[in-house]
Image (cartoon, rainbow, N blue to C red):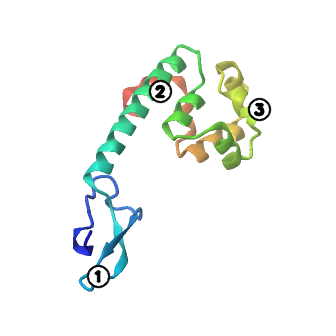
Amino acid sequence: MNVKDVPQDEKYFINTNIRDICYAVDEDGKYHQVASVGWKAKNEALALTWEHINEEAEAIKKEVLSQKKSPLAYYMHLRLCSVGLLAEYTGIPKRIIKKHLKPSGFKEAGHDCIAKYAQALHIDPSDFILEEMSDENSI
């Protein structure tokens, strides 16, 4: 691919610092690293992936509203965060996080713990309240 042909489809990464490096040939036949903000095929794959993640999140949200899972499970899924990753971000042991994924365990979580979860998941602590979750505008 020539340097001038490196795709620059900014659908998802406009106004971000995210770039892919492509190797392209210049006019002299030498390879150079060229930053790309995306291309159509990648953007379509990302769109399908996020559509699937959001569908799964809606199913988890229904489980949260029916008291089968805690709000923490919903936001972890939406932010693509595993128990191990959340433990690293918050300093909360994995076993405690697993306990908080259940509604009964989550009710026992203290304000400091909830604040750590909210900060790590980039949400407001009030987003964990079930009444807030049932409001379509909150998510």
On the question of residue 116 being in view, the answer is no
Q: Which of marks 1 and 3 is in front?
A: 1
Q: How far apart are marks 2 and 1 (CA)?
A: 56 Å
Q: Name the residue under label 3.
A: 95
Q: Distance between the residues labelled 1 and 3?
A: 56 Å
Which element carries disc 2, helix, strand or loop? helix
Tell me which amino acid carries mark 2: Met
The label number, if any, that marks residue 133 in the structure image: 2
Residue 94 percent across, percent down from the top left:
74, 36
Residue 67 percent across, percent down from the top left:
58, 15
Q: Quadrant of the C terminus?
A: top left
Q: Mark 1 points at which residue?
A: 29
Q: Is residue 26 left or right of residue 61?
A: left
Q: Which residue is drawn at 27% across and 74% down?
A: 3
Which element carries disc 3, helix, strand or loop? helix
Hey, which quadrant is residue 10 in on the image? bottom left
Q: Nearer the viewer, mark 2 or mark 1?
A: 1
Which element carries disc 1, helix, strand or loop? loop
Neighbour class for label 3 at 10 Å: few (<14), some, many (≥20)?
Answer: few
On the question of residue 133 being in view, the answer is yes
Q: Nearer the viewer, mark 2 or mark 3?
A: 3
Q: Residue at x 53, y 46 (%)?
A: 122
Tell me which amino acid carries mark 1: Gly
